[in-house]
Image (spheres, rainbow, N blue to C red):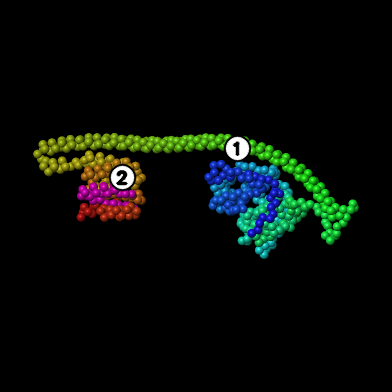
Amino acid sequence: MLTLERDDSTLLPGMFRLAVTAPDDQQPTIQVVEATHALVGRAAGCTVRFDHPKVGRRHAYLQAIYGRIYCIDLGSGGGTYWGELARKGGWFDPSDVVRIGPYQIQLVDTLGLGSGLESFGDDFDPLDRYVDAHGRLPKVTLTVRGAGRRANYTISRPITLVGSAAPCKLRLGDKTVSSIHCSLLWLPDGLWVVDLAGKNGTSVQGKTVHCAKLAEGEPLRVGKFSLRVHYPGAPEAHRRRPKSKSKSISPEVERDPEAGPSASPNGEPSAFSSDKADLILQSEVLDERQQLLEGRELKLSEAQMRLAAEWDRLHADRAAITVIGEDLARRHEALANEERRQFEQAESLERQRREMAARAAEITEIRKNLKAEWVKLETARANVTDTKQRLTAEREELSSIQQELQRRRVEITSSDQTPQQEIDMIFAAPTVAPAGDVDMLEATRHNKVFATERNGDTLVVIPLGDATDFHYGDVHTESNKVRRLLEGGSFKNLVVDLGSAPVFTTVTIKVVVVLSRIVSNRGGQAVLCEASAKTREVLQTMKLLELWPHFDSREEAIRNFAGVGNS
């Protein structure tokens, strides 16, 4: 297994701190990332390591670019969430809470990352194509070789993911390449590579790298593929690899090993004089370096003091911002509670309004029904008044007839020439229908549900529609009127005409059965006529046609009674 042999990450200045909250933690833990990038996951090589099954091996990638932190999900199964929203990538600001598995991370602050987004809009995304309007970057091309193929690729995005998965803009299809293997950073000083713990790592010129700047012509090895970097037309600074710090070598005087000792002008051996001169020279060099180191140490101490003061100021500002944020959070919670209370009141008022509207509609309907019932009562009252007047007139007429009969009876009785048979014929001559028959037939003459007609001693009942089409009170009242008419004994037979509706339900059929049984129990005959096919099916199912026959027309039904009488 290759070991890390080259890391240029210290040449990219800056660092940042993260506040990490574990599932069981009450307070977050501060973790310092002393680099411009971090790999988050449960793998051993991750900068921020979360040992939890809901966290991917390489879950997310944090990269500082142009003074801000950008977060990229590395195809994790659980996803990376900004609050409650899962995203593939986005800016990670101090106001954001990013959730990875059961862990929550927040950006506390950054140090030394600089700035550079002033000229960029809010919609700038380093994963999108870069336009020169934001500032010119050096042109960078890659020659890709591997798996028997060769291709050229031009860098066009500030962050380019390299791997075998679909999110990678530079896709290398081979099992030796991880889904997201590494990242290429396109910066003003050239192209950088950041290893993302891919299979067998990432190497430059045979050396495994964690973060490195790619110089002109340097080969970048990713799995079986070799990517060679070119800077066409770029300045020399972009073409060179940054110089790493090396150990200082003290100057030495070359000596000929075969030469013998030589004497100095004052008679001392030449070897001793040469060693003395070397020591003097080395002492002078060491003095110069000591002075240089002391100057650098002084500057470093001053810089550290400035950084400490800046750090304290940042912490004070952060504490003040925290207090302001807590106050804003309390105000926001109070405002949310007030909005929730107002919303609940609005819902309650809306429910009351709907209930009042429903009650108003119900009252309107009741008024309408009462008005209709009042009209019916007035109509019935007028009908009763008319009936009473007719009955009074008929009683007066009957009284006058009885008086005339009495008078004629006296005359006939007093006359000796009138036979007894003629007297009987005179008493039997005037035949007037009983008052009860007139009352009952007149009472049903204005029915709306069950109309009635008379044909000799046969009563014809016509249901004007199914019972479900009428008010239950009307059905009950009119059916009782017809029942009392049959129970009065004035009618021997019954014809039920079912031709007024396409189908009748069981309520209407039960009324017909009751009326037919009354006639049958009194020794008469009941028949049905003009029923539709659907109604006949219902009657057949109830086996009623076996008790009371059905005729196609009312005339046939009435003729049936005439035939029975003749026979």
Q: Residue 29 location in percent, x, y? A: 58, 43
Which quarter of the rendering shows the C terminus? Answer: bottom left
Name the element at disc 2: strand
| Residue 145 in magenta stretch | no
Q: Is residue 412 left or right of residue 143?
A: left
**Please, what is the three-letter code of the amino acid marked with disc 1?**
Thr
Find disc 2 in the rendering and name its residue: 450
Give me the residue at 27% from left, 49% from top: 513
Q: Is residue 545 left or right of residue 60?
A: left
Q: Residue 456 location in percent, x, y? A: 24, 47
Q: CA distance from mark 1 to mark 2?
A: 85 Å
Span colored in magenta: 505-532
Find disc 1 in the rendering and name its residue: 322
- How crowded is the residue under tag 1: few (<14 C-alpha within 10 Å), some, or many (20+)? few
Name the one closer to the observer, 166 or 468: 166
Name the one closer to the observer, 498 or 383: 498
Q: Residue 275 location in percent, x, y? A: 83, 53
| Residue 508 in magenta stretch | yes
Q: Residue 304 location in percent, x, y? A: 70, 41
